Image: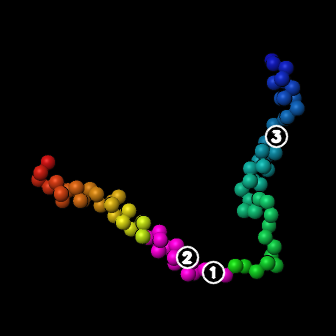
Amino acid sequence: MNPAVSRTAAQRSFSLMTAARSAARSMEPHPFQRVSATRKSAKADWAGEAKRLGKQMAIFAPGITVLLGWPYLAKVIADGHV
């Protein structure tokens, strides 16, 4: 065995518990800092949400119509001509 590999393997042992603890900590909703319970919650910004929804619908509605409607449009255009 290569001396560098054996030295690295001897220095760093693998532990399932350490790996599981690390994985569990990475899935926490607040991995770095918790928000204080004494801090007031932000108020809902319904106007901003409506604006965001309007922008998304302006792109989504025509896009999904083209994506799902092109077979019907092709049938209407090429009906009997292919």
Q: Closer to the camera, 45 or 26?
A: 45
Looking at the image, residue 15 lies above or below residue 46: above
Amino acid type of the residue tagged 2 in the rendering: Glu
Q: Residues within 10 Å of mark 3 (few under 14, many from 20)?
A: few
Q: What is the x, y in percent for residue 17?
A: 81, 45
Callout 2 secondary element? helix
Q: Earlier in the sequence, mark 2 or mark 1?
A: 1
Q: Mark 3 = which residue?
A: 15
Q: What is the x, y in percent for residue 60?
A: 42, 66
In the image, 54: left or right of 71? right
Name which residue lies at 18% across and 57% down: 77
Quarter of the image for residue 5 reads: top right
Amino acid type of the residue tagged 1 in the rendering: Ala
In space, the residues marked 2 and 1 are separated at their CA atoms by 9 Å
Q: What is the x, y in percent for residue 36?
A: 81, 73
Q: Closer to the camera, 36 or 13?
A: 36
Q: Closer to the camera, 58 or 16?
A: 58
- Which range of residues does the magenta coloring cover? 43-57
In space, the residues marked 3 and 1 are separated at their CA atoms by 45 Å
Disc 2 vs disc 1: Cβ atoms closer than 8 Å? yes
Residue 73 badge: none
Number of the front mark, 3 or 2: 2
Name which residue lies at 77% across and 54% down: 25
Q: Mark 1 = which residue?
A: 44
Is residue 73 one of those drawn in magenta? no
Q: How is the image coloured?
A: rainbow
